[in-house]
Image (cartoon, rainbow, N blue to C red):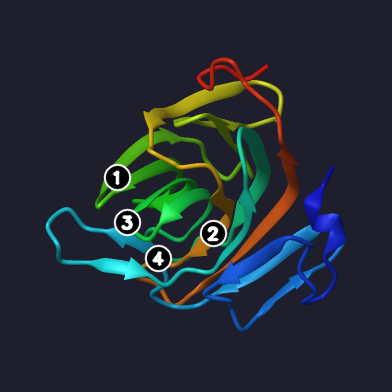
Amino acid sequence: MNILSNGYNKTIPQEFAWINEPLDYSFDEDRLTVNTPPASDFFRDPAGKVIKDTAPYLYAVIEGDFVLTAKVDVEMIAEYDSGCLMVMQDEMHWAKVCYEYIKGIPTIVSVVTKDTSDDCISSKVGSSKPYLKIQRAGNCFGFHYSLDGMTWEMVRYFKMNAAGAIKAGVVSQSPIGQGCRVVFEQLELEKRRVEDVRLVD
């Protein structure tokens, strides 16, 4: 089921809420469009120079195992402009997989934060409007991306101590830019068990 079909204009889907609600966003034709504010990001620099938790994050609180998928399109203007899927236990423990602008090339990036952020650049994918996926099984998480929604590549496999319910949803960000437009489509949430989160069935 496309969760975004339950939203209209600025009426968000049932069970969802905002952290850092943006001034300009809308639901229309089964999609969410966010005009991302300037200097918005979730990042905890290992060197301690940059600590940000300012990006718009639309989330639901989810109990147990799940699969979260969305198609992402980003108006890439400045370095690091991106759209992401993110899971969050609390402000010090969260992780995201992103379609991001890196050195002029649309790229898949992941960040796992356990007090500080571990930033990893994965694959150059071009302007393909990729699908992103998060799979959870207990405290194990798998990040994946696909260019066609059928063939998937693993981005990250990691453990995060997540006691029961956690937040999961979508993030738009423009860490050093003046903002950008991010569109999320086909946001699907399945509450089901995946035996091996490294694999997409």
The alpha-carbon separation of the residues under discs 3 and 4 comes to: 14 Å
- Nearer the N terminus, badge 1 or badge 2? 1
Q: Identify the secondary structure beneath mark 1.
A: strand
* Numbered disc in front, either 3 or 2: 3
Quarter residue 156 falls in: top left
Disc 3 vs disc 1: Cβ atoms closer than 8 Å? no
Residue 40 position within the rendered picture, expressed as x and y whole percent measured from the top left = 42, 71
* Quarter of the image that includes the N terminus: top right
**Residue occupied by mark 3:** 92
For image coordinates 75% across by 73% down, the residue present is: 26
| Residue 60 drawn at (x, y percent) | 64, 56
Residues at marks 3 and 4 touching, judged by CB atoms closer than 8 Å: no
Q: Residues within 10 Å of mark 1 (few under 14, many from 20)?
A: some
Q: Residues within 10 Å of mark 2 (few under 14, many from 20)?
A: many
* Residue found 44% across the figure and 41% down from its top: 162
The earlier-in-sequence mark between 3 and 2 is 3
Lower position in the chain sequence, tag 4 or tag 1: 4
Residue, x 52% and y 75% (percent of image)?
20
Residue beneath disc 2: 171
**Tag 1: amino acid:** Asp
Q: Which residue carries the number 1 mark? A: 119
